[in-house]
Amino acid sequence: MFRRDGVWAIISKIRDLVRESFIAKSLKLRIILLLLLTGIIPVIITRGVILRNYEKNAVSSRNSDLSIQCNILSNYLLSSGYLDGNMQDSVNSEIEQMANLYDGRVIIIDRDFRAVKDTYGIYESKTIISEDVLRAFSGEPSNGYDSSNHYVEVVMPVVDAFSQEVNGVIIACASTDSLMATIDVLRRQAFILEVIMTIIIIAISIMFSRLLMRPFNRVTQAINKIEAGYEQEVIDVKGYTEMESIVGALNQLLSRMKKLDDSRQEFVSNVSHELKTPLASMKVLADSLINMGEDATYEMYREFMEDITHEIDRENSIITDLLSLVKMDKTAGTLNIKEVDINEMTEAILKRLKPLADLNSIDLIFESIRQVRAEVDEVKLTLAVSNLIENAIKYNNPNGWVRVMLDADHQFFLITVTDSGIGIPAEAQDHVFERFYRVDKSHSREIGGTGLGLAIARSAVIMHRGAIKVSSLEGQGTEFAIRIPLTYIAPSSR
């Protein structure tokens, strides 16, 4: 009954709007709709329940009143002998008055199932047999309500109080048009009230949605300012616990982005400096030879050319390491993974670096705890381990040693590179994996270091979903430890 009303049309419209993509993506509109539906649906349900209960109670009251009148009329019929043929005008007048009172109809049936009185005059002298009439002759009264035609009906037996014999039946109908008119008025008033409440709820919903969305708007404004170039260290937005969590995550992201930007600028500056330094040295050497002119001897030319060759090798080393880093960044998701014998790989690296170790009087020691096979990119992992061992050789003391140990458990394998070298100061250990970072720049240039070896090693290890850490005591030596899964863990597509 209620679905025909205008409010249901509004709800249907809202439901269709919710299906539109803009509303489906807008948190503000979702909040408005949630508050709107939360406020309107209980109002609609309450109105329906109240109107139905009113109709039910009104019909029940009309049935009760009609039954009482039928009881009174039944006693009057018995006392006057109306059903025995004594059809007095006064009784007929009472019957007509009762029918008019309820704007309905009264039919009197005698014991022979013949209608002796019909206020409509249609069934008089006709036989009426129906289920309700038969039940009444059995002593059972009945009543009913026809909601489509708007009337109630009472079928009541006329029972002799002394003999308990059913002498006839009264069929009384009463119109409920007046009740329906009252219900229609109430329904219209309820609809007007619903519209007013809907407008109020919409206004409240919009107000609350704006209040709820204020922290989000402030965050959006702060992000827009940052995007426009406005320098802002942190986003300071107070609000709900969830919003503070989001702001905290954004601030961490901003901090990380700032560090990355600083690192990028420092990297560019370092690259420019490192590439220009060998060129500047070569230019100075070349200019010196030119200025010497004919006074330059063969030995001077040879010495200067050897220095220029050294600077060219240094420039080439820097460019090679830079290309290695760039290549790793570009192929991070395309590792050439295959099962590799890690023992053989490590032995091959040590064999290749032994001439460098002998040149510096460094002993290379390899300790293999067990045989290890793992799924790795052999080229990239070889580059990482080679850089660690090469650094251990270069930054060692004369007649020192470098020990490489290989071990594994059921999940990871571990490579440690320990040396007896000069060590790394505690304050520098957090920065050794940064690109172009050098603990001792003068010593690094003497041995040809570029400051990229450890950055390359770290990138290769991370690409294998592994970890690398350093521990060192200045003047006593350094240990680098690599831990990598035996089975390659592919990055998630999410």
Image: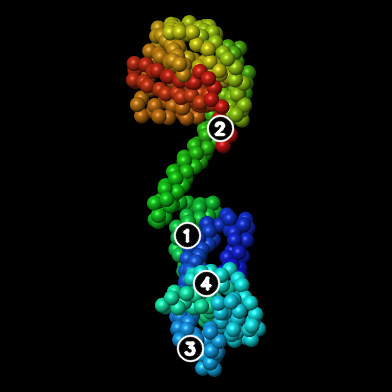
User: Which element carries disc 3, helix, strand or loop?
Assistant: helix
Q: Nearer the viewer, mark 4 or mark 3?
A: 3
Q: Residues within 10 Å of mark 4 (few under 14, many from 20)?
A: many
Callout 4 touching callout 1 (CB < 8 Å): no
Residue type highlighted by circle 1: Met
The CA span between labels 2 and 3 is 98 Å
Residue with the mark numbered 2? 492
Q: Residues within 10 Å of mark 3 (few under 14, many from 20)?
A: some
Q: Is residue 391 above or below residue 435?
A: above
User: Which element carries disc 2, helix, strand or loop?
Assistant: loop
Q: Nearer the viewer, mark 3 or mark 1?
A: 3
Residue with the mark numbered 4? 136
Callout 2 touching callout 3 (CB < 8 Å): no
The CA span between labels 4 and 2 is 81 Å
x%, y% of residue 241? Answer: 39, 51
User: Which element carries disc 4, helix, strand or loop?
Assistant: helix
Please tell me in which quadrant of the rendered image residue 64 appears. bottom left
Mark linked to residue 213: 1
Q: Nearer the viewer, residue 398 or 161?
A: 161
Q: Earlier in the sequence, mark 3 or mark 1?
A: 3
Quadrant position of the C terminus in the picture: top right
Q: Earlier in the sequence, mark 2 or mark 3?
A: 3
Residue at x-position 42% and y-position 23%: 469
Residue type highlighted by circle 4: Ala
Q: Earlier in the sequence, mark 1 or mark 2?
A: 1
